[in-house]
Image: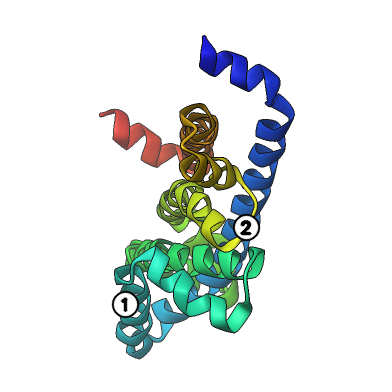
Amino acid sequence: MHFLSYIAQNGELVLQSSVEHIQLTLFSILLAVLIGVPVGILISYLSALQKPVLGGANVVQAVPSIALLGFLVPVLGIGERPAVCMVVLYSLLPIIKNTAIGLAHINPQTVEAARGIGMTRFQILTKVKLPLALPVIMAGIRIAAVTSVGLVTLTAFIGAAGLGYLIYSGIRTVNTYQILAGAVPACLLALAVDFAASLVEKAVTPVCYRDQGKK
């Protein structure tokens, strides 16, 4: 009851923090997709780049998020810029990897048939490979999106907006209700993002693949 009373009294702050959290997460994921998908396409065609690119992304994943923020703050300052940069860097690995894997596992006979009817390499990529690889690519984006919700929460330590501000302020003031006011919406947001991404993933899956999954 006390927690609900706190939410009622500070509803505007919780709502504002939630909106800021969503905006920061969506912007970061969109930026990661705009970078990661083209890189994944590139390394699927240039196999020599796969090891260094995926190796570099793996190294970033191995660095603790707080430590990475510590490296970025002296360069980018405090606030949203290092926050977005950190989330983007952490989101790149699943997006790049799933894009490359999805394109690499297209049936060669399908690609050969596309060549046989006179399609160019660009047409094969955009009209054959990408549509077939889209479910795998979307799975990587889904992983990155859900992870980003939690990562954005941590960026409150460097002055970024979002639900992490409520958690951080609650920890400093030993206010349990304020901590929960940030933690509960963050958890609900992560679940909502996962559910929404699963619907998109299902929508982009070709009908023939859906039928295979039911068997």
Circle nearer the viewer, 2 or 1: 2
Residues packed near mark 1 inside 10 Å, few (<14), some (14 to 19) or many (20 plus): few
Q: Quadrant of residue 166?
A: top right
Counting from the top left corner in percent of width and height, residue 34 is at 61, 67
Relative placement, left or right, of 47 versus 115 is left
Which residue is nearer to you in this view: 98 or 147? 147
Residues packed near mark 2 inside 10 Å, few (<14), some (14 to 19) or many (20 plus): many
The label on residue 209 is none
**How much space separates mark 2 and mark 1, taking CA atoms?**
24 Å
Amino acid carrying label 1: it is Val
Total marks shown come to 2
Which residue is nearer to you in this view: 28 or 202? 28
Counting from the top left corner in percent of width and height, residue 207 is at 45, 37
Residue 3, visible in the rendered structure: yes
What residue appears at the point 30 percent right and 34 percent down from the top-left corner? Answer: 213
What residue appears at the point 34 percent right and 85 percent down from the top-left corner? Answer: 47
What residue appears at the point 62 percent right and 21 percent down from the top-left corner? Answer: 7
Q: Secondary structure at mark 1?
A: helix
Which residue is nearer to you in this view: 40 or 35? 35
Counting from the top left corner in percent of width and height, residue 84 is at 59, 64
22 relative to 182, above or below: below
Q: Which residue is mark 1?
A: 59
Q: Which residue is mark 2?
A: 160
Q: Quadrant of residue 185?
A: top right
